[in-house]
Image: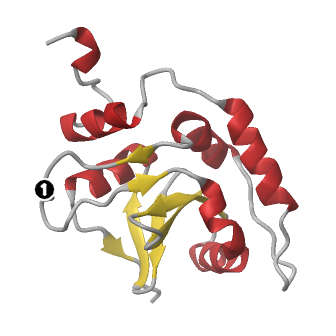
């Protein structure tokens, strides 16, 4: 097998394959696009006066994965694998929703992109933890973007967020 098709130690094989099929490679970094998204999100104010939180964990994910459409290469373990599109502007009009979730979790939340065909919004907090927000609730996808992608690509059932 040619070296460009070998999996990195960073991702499980199915995640690595899905990322490479989407155009990702180790060292990918588009900070100009990430800064453009940050400026656009910072400049957006909801009708209720809500604004987006921008922080390094979000900008780093945008720089490395921004613009990619990642599709799982096979069946899922517990759920159907979910395609992802890393474009934080998918959450542009959700400043209040993301702020509310952040307040409930005691952190700040920023959009990352979307799952499926706009079925859910992907978001990240200041610590790098990743969430999915859809019409059924809010879901915890993992402590890092790498874990979150593994959850979605391999079809592992994410944990539902509940407030006690």
**Dot 1: element:** loop
Q: Which residue corresponds to the image point at 69% horizontal and 31% vertical from the top-left?
A: 31
Residue 151 vs residue 75, the one in the foreground: 75
Q: Which residue corresponds to the image point at 38% horizontal and 37% vertical from the top-left?
A: 22
The quarter in which the N terminus is drawn is: top left
The image shows residue 23, relative to residue 90, as above or below, that is above
The image shows residue 98, relative to residue 42, as above or below, that is below
Rendering quarter of residue 94? bottom right
The image shows residue 129, relative to residue 146, as above or below, that is below
Q: In the rendered view, does 90 fall on the left or right side of 131?
A: right
The image shows residue 79, relative to residue 10, as above or below, that is below
Residue 105 vs residue 48, the one in the foreground: 48
Q: What is the total number of numbered labels drawn onto the structure image?
A: 1
Judged from this view, the residue extending furthest toward the bottom is 164
The quarter in which the C terminus is drawn is: bottom left
Q: Position of residue 120 (x, y in %)?
A: 46, 71
Q: Which residue is mark 1?
A: 75
Q: In the rendered view, does 37 fall on the left or right side of 27?
A: right
Q: Which residue corresponds to the image point at 77% horizontal and 43% vertical from the top-left?
A: 36
């Amino acid at each position: 097998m040619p070296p460009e098709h070998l999996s990195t130690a960073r991702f499980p094989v199915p995640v690595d394959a899905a990322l490479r099929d989407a155009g990702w490679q180790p060292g990918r970094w588009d900070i100009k696009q990430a800064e453009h998204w940050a400026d656009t999100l910072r400049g957006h104010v909801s009708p209720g006066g809500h604004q987006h939180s921008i922080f390094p964990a979000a900008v780093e994910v945008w720089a490395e994965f921004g613009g990619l459409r990642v599709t799982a290469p096979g069946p899922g373990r517990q759920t159907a694998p979910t395609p992802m599109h890393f474009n934080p502007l998918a959450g542009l009009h959700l400043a209040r929703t993301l702020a509310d979730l952040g307040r409930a979790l005691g952190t700040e939340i920023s959009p990352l992109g979307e799952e499926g065909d706009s079925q859910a919004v992907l978001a990240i907090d200041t610590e790098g933890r990743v969430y999915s927000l859809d019409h059924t609730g809010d879901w915890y996808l993992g402590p890092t973007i790498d874990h979150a992608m593994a959850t979605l690509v391999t079809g592992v059932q994410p944990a539902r967020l509940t407030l006690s």
